[in-house]
């Protein structure tokens, strides 16, 4: 069994918005066509009630797309030999628990990886812990903001379904300050306020074999995101899944060294 290598410290200097550099890059190639059997089984969420969804983001099309993308990317995940898997903004715990089940079905036992989930919202922390327990998945839940409490160089697989909906900066700041359900979706201008805080620290917090999975919408300017991460950290971006859901064009990008 793997001994967890994530250590926590007080959250620190991730709160200033990072300006997006002026970078140009050719459009990302389209993702591979979806598998005929795409629609990854969800973990059981029967333990969560209607009252829980008043304060915790309920799984929706973005959740399903991220799990489908992770299931289709099993070969890459196995090659990463994940010792530490971390989800930021875990909400209900559906994604991190679902990934543990994907890995188990792919022959990667849960005991071989330390699974960690963080969220600002205390109700989401409780829901995530309950979802993991209900599905017999060992998981450590931490109330924290982004990567401020993680030891550098330790994360092998990083997952993030951020608040990506374009809103005013004031609305995004209010959600983060109140630590309520609006923090799960209010993303500020271009839906990028929270993502732009994360990206500068991405390279130093991932392990040498680390991979980062990011979900977003077209309004987040994925080509620019890819160029920024390549310029700052020398990491390659690949669009691995895309889906239209009502009025949103969702995507999942994988970043790797």
Image (cartoon, rainbow, N blue to C red):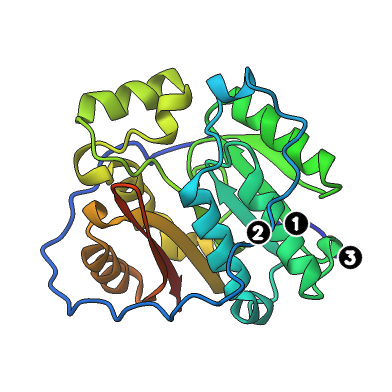
* Residue 188 lies in quadrant: top left
* Residue 241 lies in quadrant: bottom left
Write the residue at 22% across / 52% down: 219
| Image spot of residue 106 (x, y percent) | 76, 74
The answer to whether residue 242 is visible is yes
Name the residue tied to disc 2. Answer: 85
| Image spot of residue 229 (x, y percent) | 32, 67
Picture quarter with the N terminus: bottom right
Nearest the camera: 2 or 188? 188
Name the residue tied to disc 3. Answer: 1
- Examine the rendered structure and indicate whether residue 104 appears above or below residue 124: below
Q: Which mark is residue 114?
A: 1
Mark 2 or 3, nearer chain start: 3
Nearest the camera: 32 or 212? 32
Write the residue at 43% across / 81% down: 32
Mark 3 or 1, nearer chain start: 3
| Image spot of residue 228 (x, y percent) | 25, 66
Element type at mark 1: strand
Nearest the camera: 120 or 7? 120
| Image spot of residue 14 (x, y percent) | 38, 41
Write the residue at 18% across / 55% down: 20
Q: Image check: 159 left or right of 140?
A: left
């Amino acid at each position: 069994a793997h001994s967890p290598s994530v250590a926590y410290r007080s959250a620190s200097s991730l709160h200033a918005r990072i300006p997006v550099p002026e970078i140009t890059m050719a459009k990302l190639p389209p993702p591979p066509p979806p598998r005929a059997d795409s629609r990854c089984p969800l973990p059981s969420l029967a333990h969560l009630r209607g009252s829980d969804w008043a304060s915790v983001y309920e799984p929706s099309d973005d959740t399903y797309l991220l799990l489908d993308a992770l299931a289709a990317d099993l070969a890459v995940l196995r090659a990463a030999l994940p010792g530490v898997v971390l989800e930021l903004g875990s909400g209900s715990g559906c994604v991190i628990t679902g990934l543990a089940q994907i890995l188990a079905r792919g022959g990667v036992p849960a005991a071989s990886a330390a699974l960690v989930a963080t969220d600002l919202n205390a109700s989401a922390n409780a829901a995530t812990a309950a979802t993991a327990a209900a599905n017999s998945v060992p998981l450590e839940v931490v109330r924290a903001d982004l990567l401020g409490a993680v030891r550098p160089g330790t994360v092998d697989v990083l997952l993030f379904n951020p608040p990506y909906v374009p809103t005013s900066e004031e609305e995004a700041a209010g959600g983060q300050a109140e630590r309520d359900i609006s923090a799960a979706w209010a993303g500020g201008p271009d839906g990028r306020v929270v993502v732009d805080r994360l990206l500068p620290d991405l390279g130093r917090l991932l392990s040498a074999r680390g991979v980062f999975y990011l979900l977003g919408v077209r309004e987040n300017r994925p080509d620019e995101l890819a160029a920024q991460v390549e310029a700052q950290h020398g990491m390659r971006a690949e669009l691995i899944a895309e889906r239209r859901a009502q009025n949103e064009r969702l995507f999942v990008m994988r970043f790797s060294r």
